[in-house]
Each structure stands twice: as C-alpha cells, then as structure tokens.
Image: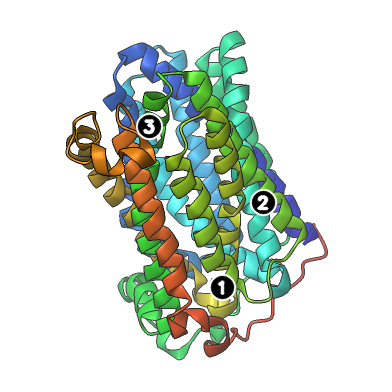
Amino acid sequence: MKAFRLIWFGQLVSIFGSEVTIFALAIWVWQETGQVTALALIPVFGWLPGLLFGPLAGALVDRWNRRLVLMLSDGGAAAMTLMLLILYLSGNLQIWHLYLAAAVGSLFSAFQWPALSATISLMVDKEDYSRANGLMSLAESTAMILAPVAGAVLITFLNLGDIFFIDLLTFLVALTTLLIVAIPEPKREEAPEEAKLLSLWADTWYGFVYILRRPGLLGIQLLLFSYNFVKSFGFAVLVPMVLARSGGDTLVLGAVQSAAGIGAVVGGLILSFWAGTNRQIHGVLGGIVLASLFTQVLFGLASEVLLWSAFAFIGTVFRPWINAANQAIWQRKVPSAVQGRVFGARATIALIALPLGYLFAGPLADHVFEPAMQPGGAWAELFGPLVGAGPGSGMALMTVGAGIITVLIGVVGYFIRPIRQVETIIPDHDTSPKKTQAVTA
C-alpha cells in the first residue's frame, strides 16, 4: 500500500486544489452575472463530454501506459487551468471560457477514473481493495469539507488569478507523485480471448458486452443505476428543501452540508483502516439501505437543523462503503487488462442516471409535489401529518418517497441470486496484484 498511498496523497492535493478553484469560480460567476442558470451550466458542460467519451476513454486506457494516461489526465486539467489564468490576467476571461474548460476537462477526467481504478488492482492486494477505495472516497470527502472553507478565506485576500496559480501547484504535486512511483502494467496476454485483437471501435463497446455477458455484474450495475436515478430525485431538491423549511437560513444549510461532509470523511477513515466485510456485496446492499434510510427517509421527515445534521452525518458514513465495496467486487472479478474498458462503460452508465434524475426532479417538485402539499392542496390532508404542509413540504415528501424506494432497491438486491452471490458465482481474475515496494520508477 506504500506506493499507492503516495499516489493517493498526490490526488488528494490535486482534488483539493480543483475544488477550491470551483468554489472561487462559482463566486466569480455569480458576481459577474447574478444568474443561477449561468452557474448551473458549468457542471452540465462538465458532465456531458465525459458521458459520451467514457467508453472510448476506457478502451484507450487498456491500450496505453497507465502512468502516461494518469499524467495526461492531470496535465490536461492543468492546461485548462493555465488557459483560464492567462485569460484572467489579460482581462479577457468570459463565462463561455469556463464552459469550454469544463467540457475539455471532462474529457480528461473520462480517462482518469478508469485508469486510477484499474491501477489500484495492480498495486494493492485484493484483500486491501476496499481499504484503497476507502482512501479515494476519503480524499474526495476531505476536499468537499475543506475546499469551501479554504476558498472562502482565499478569495477574501487573493484574486481569482492567485487561486488559479495555487491550483496549478497542486497539479504539480500530483504529477510528481506519478513520476516517482513505479506503476505496474497489466499483462495484456491475460485478457479474455474475446477481448484480444479487437479494433478500437470494438474495444469501445467491449466494456458493455463484458457486463452484459455476466448476469451478476449486470445485476449490480442495473441495481446501482436504479439507486442513483431514484436517489437523485431527493438530492436534487435537498438544498431548496432545507432553505424553504428553514426560512431561507443559509447557516442552517451550511451546517447540514458540513455534517454530511464530515460523515463521508468518517466513513472513508473507517474503511482506510478496515477492509470491510468478508462479502463485499453486504457493503453495497446494506450501505444502500442504511444510507437511504438516514439521508432520505428520516431526513425528509425531519424539520429542524439538529435532526437534519444528525441524519445527514449518519447516512453519509455509509456512502463510502457502497462505493468501496462495489469497486472491490469489480476489481476482483474483471481482469486488469480490460478494466479500463469495463470501468469506462460503468462510468457512462452511472453518469446517465444522475442528469436523468435531476431533469425530472425539478419539474416534479415545482409543478406537482410543492403545489399539492401547500395548505389546502390535494395531498396536504393525507401526507401533512408526516411532512407538514407549506413551503418545502412537497420536496420533503419527494425525499421520503425516493428514500423508501431506494431502501427497497437495496433489500430487493438480496433476493436476486446473481447479485447476492456474485462473489462466489464469478471467479476472481487470475492476475495477481503486484505489491510495489519501491517508490522509484
């Protein structure tokens, strides 16, 4: 784990720098335009290219040197930051430049996730997969908590150009760790026969074919797609629901979001010291049930900051468990030589669920749930005793409903044999993970 921890540290620093920049850019866009739409379009441009390019990126990851892919993905993101810095210093930075940078950055990110996920299985023993994946969740959660605080302080004393420069320094740290750590390459000859000698175009679709031919992995992927899709209905309305039910108190919202971030950090820390259950599927299905129960069902039923914060904290402790256990299953079952293709397909399927859910959640909240849960509304008498009637009650009902469905999704997974027994039905791949003791390439 020593070599992997060094790479992890570099990624932690880089993610933190990127999150600080994103926070500062959000403030700059709001100050420049005062428009929510202008701000919301940035993540949209950051999603779509990666969604479309993910399968091809995964195919290329399996063909190219893993270290080179990771360096190119970090270097490409750094190039976008450098472009924004130059535009800012020259006084020419405009909103559309941010959309362009987000879109191009998304293309490079499409390479990074499958490459990094596949690299873990080459550098870490399979017994430590959950621990390594927990560390990656910890890096993201830590950045989620610290970046807004650091960004708020830095933007007070520095300008946007200074923050761009700091972000470039964090990219340099990540690139340095990739240079000094020996990253093993998968044995291409150990790829399944069906994956050998494919054209790049066929390689692009191979990840989907691989998943479709294995009912257990397909079942997990469809279950998680359903979970992410339904979950997004509650998460899309979380911020406006809290604001509506707290009278627009941003301090309450900040407290709730901080509690959620701390919970995710605690969950990641636990996993970094504990490899999880013997059967990783319990981490996936049990994590879905517990996370949904606290962060959606009980959260939606609550109406005060202490309960919101408590449920957000407890529920998000289980989120890293879902991700880490799921990753560990795939890293054990999919040969290293084709993990880029398969993980690229997984990422594309997962990303589709989120924008689809968000697309439907807004209109449902505005035109169905909120009007129906106002005093005298169509559902107020029936559901009012549960979530109250008034501003935010419709969104609270949406959150509770989404939570109940996602709890059931986790429970149903235990009744589907290919999912429940995926770890015994599908054998571990034959490639033995290499422990990299030296940290000099």
Q: Horizontally, is 308 left or right of 125 in the view? A: left
Q: Horizontally, is 352 left or right of 305 in the view? A: left
Give neighbour class at mark 2: few <14, some 14-19, many 20+ (Cα, 10 Å): many
Q: Secondary structure at mark 1?
A: helix
Q: Is residue 293 visible?
A: yes
The quarter holding residue 37 reads top left
Q: Residue drawn 35% across and 69% down?
A: 204
Q: Residue drawn 46% across and 32% down?
A: 303
Residue labelled with disc 2: 268
The quarter holding residue 97 reads top left
Q: Nearer the viewer, mark 1 or mark 3?
A: 3
Residue situated furthest top in the rendering: 157
Labelled disc at residue 281: 1
Q: Is residue 441 visible?
A: no
Residue labelled with disc 3: 241
Q: Which amino acid, mark 2?
A: Gly
Residue placed most toward the observer, 413 or 104: 413
Give neighbour class at mark 1: few <14, some 14-19, many 20+ (Cα, 10 Å): many
In primary-sequence order, the first of circles 1 and 3 is 3
Compared with residue 335, is residue 313 higher up or lower down, i.e. above or below?
above
